[in-house]
Image (cartoon, rainbow, N blue to C red):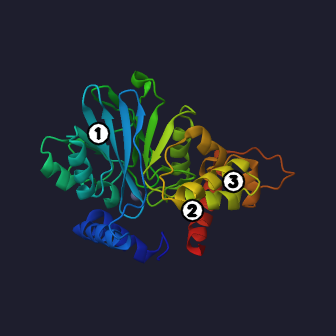
Amino acid sequence: MAKAGGCCFQIGYFLYTRTRIGYWYHQKEIKDARLKLNGEDHSKTDVTEFNNLSILPIPMLLDNYAYLIQDKQTNHSVLVDPGDPDKVLSVLENMNVVPDAILITHKHWDHSGGNVKLKTAFPTIRIYGGAMDHIPCVTHAVADGDVIKFGELTFTVIYTPGHTVGHIVYLLDGSHFDAPASLFSGDHLFLSGCGRMFEGTPTVMLRSLDKVSNLKENTLVWPGHEYAEDNLEFACNIEAENENAQEKLDWTKQKRIVKDCTCPSTIREEKSYNPFLRTGEKSVLQSIGMVTSSETTEITDTIRASALAEVRERKDQFKYKL
Ligand SMILES: [Zn+2]
């Protein structure tokens, strides 16, 4: 694969994100994923319920998750990142649900590629997305701090550039349901990982990661992909002594043997093992050779941004070794 910053990559990336070629490529990816998985889902998922709030991860493509979030008392519901529209439509039909809205985290087709077909199926549906990304069929462009509400489902938009220039995440307030908050983190934050920096510098990404890291520790994290096992293998490689990473990896391996979904995790858990949230930890900086054990250097944001770039680079290399 071409290197992320290379000329061939940039041309391919432009065609993927800004032209119809990207949409056709996405259609091929949906077909290829169905063939590869013999029509099965990549993961088994269950509904998580807190009183009248229900959250269902919908597996699609090779490792994506869309989400269906319902307020069962007021009968309002919302989809997050429904990249494969046929998969979502069959779930909605089985459950007899007509969604109010679609929340899109970013423009990549595996997240936004269902918008056209779902808008045709539900003409009055509202589609939310970041004002800075080029997302198809958006009816409501949103920005940092915007609050959007459907029945008692209240979401706050958090602007998290880095993976794309307009990436946003959605924080669902759980208080009405006596539930913790839920973060729908798209390709910004994964279980033990973060998105590749296609359109942002390490400094920009660091700021975006700090925003989610500062959320309440019991916030549930619902990411856009099932990457847990690979990511935790990498976390254990970076911090061999980190017991939290090893424990979560052991747990994840058990779940993945039977294809169980690994989400949600929590912000507290992520801060304990996710190397991309731990660039201020000496153990991570030592592991990547940025400080020695005897050094007492103050860990500035500049150092953390360099560490983030290095950890990201190592993760990209690590992936290809597996
Ligand atoms: Zn993406």
Which residue reaches farthest right? 294
Point 72% across, 61% down: residue:
288
Q: Residue 261, percent across and down? A: 47, 52
Tell me the amino acid under the disc marked 1: Val
Tell me the amino acid under the disc marked 2: Asp
Left or right of residue 238: residue 79: left
Task: Kindly identify which residue carries mark 1.
Answer: 78
Q: Quadrant of ligand 1?
A: bottom left
Which residue reaches farthest front? 258
Neighbourhood count class around disc 1 (C-alpha, 10 Å): few under 14, some 14–19, many 20 upward: many
Of the 4 image quadrants, the one containing the C terminus is bottom right
- Badge 2 vs badge 3, beta-carbon distance below 8 Å: no
Task: Kindly identify which residue carries mark 3.
Answer: 246
Left or right of residue 34: residue 280: right
Mark 2: secondary structure: helix
Mark 1: secondary structure: strand
Q: Nearer the viewer, residue 225 or 36?
A: 36
Mark 3: secondary structure: helix
